[in-house]
Amino acid sequence: MYKIIDTHCHIDMEEFEQDRDEVIQRSKAGGVDAILVPAVEPEDFDKEFKLTQRYETVYQMVGIHPHEAKKATQDAFDRAIEYLNKKKCVGIGEIGLDYYYEHSPRDIQKEVFANFLDIATENGMPVSIHCREAERDLIDIIRSKKDLKGVIHCFSGNDELLKAGLDLGLYFGIGGILTFKKSTLKDVVKEIPLEFIVFETDAPYLAPVPKRGKRNEPLYIYFVIDKMAEITGKDAVEISDVAYHNASSVFSLGL
Ligand SMILES: [Zn+2]
Ligand SMILES: [Zn+2]
C-alpha cells in the first residue's frame, strides 16, 4: 500500500455532495492520510473549516483563485489571516495567475497574488500556486519574494517554471496530467529531484488514465505513482514514501 497525501483536492465541491463520506473513507482505508483542500473564493473558508472538523484527514488552505481575484476585498484578506491561526489551516491557496481564462483582469490577478504571497511569508505559511499561460509574470512575482515556500500545483512541464521553482526550492505538484498520452510532463518530470515532488489530484478535475474523463478522487493518486515509477525506473513505494515525507514537511502536517 502506498502512503499518500493529496496536496490539492477540491473535496468541498458539489461533485462530492452525494458521497463525500464514502470517498474520504475509502481514501483513508487506501493509505491517504491527508487531503488538503484549497479555497477558490472567500466563501469557501468556512465551508472548508467545517470539513476539517468533520473529517480527521481533511485540512484546509485559504486563498483566492486567480479566476475570482476580482472578489478579493480587504475584508477577504483579513479573514484569510484569521484562519491561519486554526490548527488544520496549513497553507495559502490556491493563488496565482490564469491568463488562459482571464476571468479576472490581469492587473488584479497580479496584485491579489502578490498580496497573498506577502501574507504567506509574513506568517511563515506555504503556498499552493496555480499558473496557466502566465509563466513569465508569475516567475517575476515569485522571484521578488523572500523566503517563499510551497508548491507549484498542477505542474504541467513548463521549462522556465521548472527552473524558477527549483531555484526557489519550491515543490512540484504532480497529478493526473502525468498519465495523459500527449503530456510533455513525462520527459520533464525526470529532471525534478524526488525530494521536490508532491502528489495531488486537483479533484474533481484531471483524473489520471485509466479514469480520465471521470470524477477524480484522492485514491487515484495510485495511478500517478505507478506512472512515475514506470517513467523514472524508481521503486513505486519509495516514490510514495519520499513524496509523503515532502508533503508532510512543506505543509508542517507532522505526519
Ligand atoms: Zn489550480
Ligand atoms: Zn485547484
Image: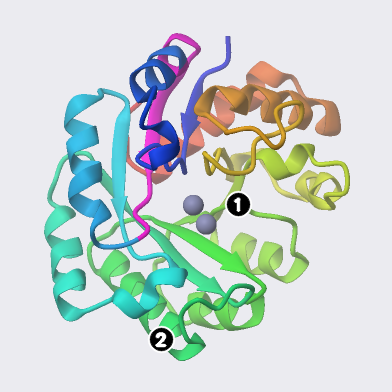
Magenta segment: does it hold 100? Answer: no
Name the residue nearer the viewer: 158 or 209: 209
Q: How is the image coloured?
A: rainbow
Label 2 sits on residue: 108
Name the residue nearer the viewer: 61 or 161: 61
| Dot 1 crowding, Cα within 10 Å, few <14, some 14–19, many 20+ | many
Q: Is residue 5 left or right of residue 185?
A: left
Residue at the limit of the structure toward the front, as seen here: 18
Mark 1 or 2, closer to the camera:
2
Q: Is residue 101 above or below residue 32?
A: below
Cβ(mark 1) to ligand 1 < 8 Å?
Answer: yes
Local secondary structure at mark 2:
helix
Segment tinted magenta in the rendering = 27-40
Q: Is residue 26 above or below residue 175?
A: above
| Dot 2 crowding, Cα within 10 Å, few <14, some 14–19, many 20+ | some
Using the rendered view, name the quadrant where residue 164 is placed.
bottom right
Magenta segment: does it hold 36? Answer: yes
Using the rendered view, name the quadrant where residue 24 is placed.
top left
Label 1 sits on residue: 154
Q: Quadrant of the N terminus?
A: top right
Residue for point 41% across, 45% down: 250
Residue for point 46% across, 80% down: 104
Q: Is residue 124 above or below residue 114?
A: above
Residue 118 x %, y %: 31, 74
Q: Is residue 234 left or right of residue 34?
A: right
